């Protein structure tokens, strides 16, 4: 009597199993494993390349994809290409598609087979200026590899994220310059575009100014130390005690006889190999101070010995001992005489900070080298040249004025007797236009000349 219900239940169970098997055939398993997206720009608002990479899994091939970008992204000029990797084999895939609003739809020919690595590159996408982390939504269509029948559109979770920052003011200025026709014409001239590209000027300044401040900080600490060291070694070299003279002479000759470039490498590389590790900034200050103190020692010695011996005799007649004579009579006159040469030494030392780029210290030259390596343009070198001139040109003119005043005080010249200095940025005093007495006085207070770069 109850065979009827049992038969009905069996029939229903069979229909459910048949439907499940039919559905499994009609909708094969399909998945994209570990989908990821990367961008090639750090800041928004500029054409950006998006790279999508994923592994295909399951038993269906992918025929197309829809990439949905965040609202406000500009896809009007996008282009794209696709490749697959099957083992070590790289296959170029023909891809067609179009962008509608913030959605890019692409079709693959042939379709992307399972168990392969898919890479889609989308070029010239312009993100919004507002930086942050954004999602990239993706849906894709597929077909069964067994029957060739289409599979319902699949969607991935919103797990693909990409980030970028808001553009800085110099970057926005650079993009504004890109749109000016005159700037385009300027850059079309090879010499101008290679050395004076306006876009690189505005973006290089904030990148190198940190290195400029670092170089100034080194000199601000190193030069006062060098002055003290130079005075000590000058007195040691003039000492009547032979061992002190030998030590001072050896130090001065070794430092002046070897290039600063070599001294930097010994301090930053040689000492570290030997196990001595000190902060890089302290090491840089020490190297600069040691190098400059050797030159300042000779400057001070020459200045002291240029003072007439009658000054010592006059001080002695007033009851002063040697130390008092040096403190109240000789040193004040020496400082006045050597101050122009000391200023020149300061200028040389400031320029020599560029050598620290060889050991990776982020001063002016190192920062410019990195920009040039990334852009292939020489404009950053022109920018750092301007930063050096901001310091050196005023100091050069200052040296000229000091030498003129020194000649007036030493020889009793009046301002009308001295040749007029040319005005302007490069209008400093010129030896060619100076009086013979001024040239003699300037040379008498200076130490033996040295070559630029030491």
Image: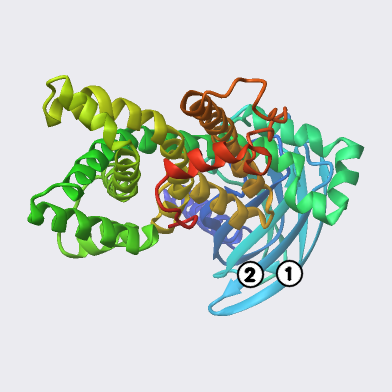
**Circles 1 and 2 in contact, beta carbons < 8 Å:** yes
First of labels 1, 2 by sequence position: 2
Where does the image place residue 100, in percent across and percent down from the top left?
Answer: 83, 40
Disc 1 crowd rating (10 Å Cα; few below 14, some 14-19, many 20+) is some
Q: Is residue 34 above or below residue 432?
A: below
The residue lying toward the viewer, choosing from 300 and 333, is 333
Tell me where residue 198 sits by quadrant.
top right
In the image: residue 402, left or right of residue 272 = right
Q: Which residue is mark 1?
A: 93
Q: State left or right for residue 180 relative to residue 290.
A: right
x%, y% of residue 426? 68, 35
Give the camera-side residue of 167 and 202.
202
The image shows residue 270 at horizontal and vertical percentages of: 24, 64
Q: Quadrant of residue 63?
A: bottom right
Label 1 sits on a secondary structure element that is strand
Vertical comparison of 340 with 192: above or below: above
Q: Is residue 127 visible?
A: yes
């Amino acid at each position: 009597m109850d065979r009827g219900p049992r038969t009905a239940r069996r029939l229903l169970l069979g229909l459910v199993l048949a439907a499940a098997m039919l559905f499994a055939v009609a909708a094969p398993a399909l998945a994209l494993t570990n989908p990821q997206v990367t961008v090639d720009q750090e800041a928004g608002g500029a054409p950006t390349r998006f790279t999508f990479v994923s592994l295909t899994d399951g038993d269906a091939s992918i025929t197309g994809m829809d990439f949905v970008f965040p609202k406000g992204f500009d896809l009007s000029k996008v282009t794209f290409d696709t490749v697959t990797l099957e083992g070590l084999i790289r296959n170029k895939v023909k891809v067609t598609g179009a962008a509608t609003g913030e959605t890019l739809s692409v079709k693959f020919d042939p379709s992307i087979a399972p168990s392969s690595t898919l890479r889609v590159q989308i070029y010239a996408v312009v993100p919004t200026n507002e930086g942050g982390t954004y999602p990239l939504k993706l849906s894709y269509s597929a077909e069964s590899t067994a029957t060739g029948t289409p599979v319902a559109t699949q969607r991935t979770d919103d797990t693909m994220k990409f980030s970028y920052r808001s553009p800085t003011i110099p970057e926005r200025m650079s993009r504004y310059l890109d749109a000016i026709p005159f700037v385009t014409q300027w850059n079309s001239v090879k010499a101008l575009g290679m050395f004076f590209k306006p876009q690189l000027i505005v973006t290089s300044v904030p990148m190198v100014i940190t290195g400029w401040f670092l170089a100034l900080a080194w000199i601000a600490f190193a030069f006062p130390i060098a002055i003290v060291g130079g005075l000590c070694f000058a007195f040691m070299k003039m000492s009547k005690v032979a061992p002190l003279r030998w030590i001072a002479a050896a130090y001065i000759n070794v430092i002046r006889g070897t290039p600063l470039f070599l001294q930097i490498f010994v301090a930053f590389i040689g000492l570290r190999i030997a196990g001595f590790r000190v902060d890089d900034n302290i090491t840089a200050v020490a190297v600069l101070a040691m190098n400059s103190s050797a030159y300042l020692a000779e400057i001070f010695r020459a200045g002291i010995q240029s003072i007439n011996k009658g000054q010592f005799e006059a001080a002695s007649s007033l009851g002063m001992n040697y130390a008092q004579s040096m403190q109240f009579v000789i040193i004040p006159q020496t400082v006045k005489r050597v101050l122009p040469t000391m200023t020149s030494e300061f200028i040389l030392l400031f320029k020599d900070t560029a050598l620290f780029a060889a050991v990776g210290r982020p001063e002016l030259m190192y920062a410019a080298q990195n920009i040039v390596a990334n852009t292939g343009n020489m404009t950053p070198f022109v920018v750092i040249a301007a930063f050096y001139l901001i310091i050196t040109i005023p100091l050069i003119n200052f040296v000229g004025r000091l030498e003129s005043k020194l000649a007036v005080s030493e020889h009793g010249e009046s301002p009308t007797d001295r040749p007029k200095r040319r005005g302007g940025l490069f209008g400093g005093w010129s030896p060619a236009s100076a009086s013979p007495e001024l040239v003699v006085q300037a040379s008498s207070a200076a130490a033996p000349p040295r070559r630029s770069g030491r």
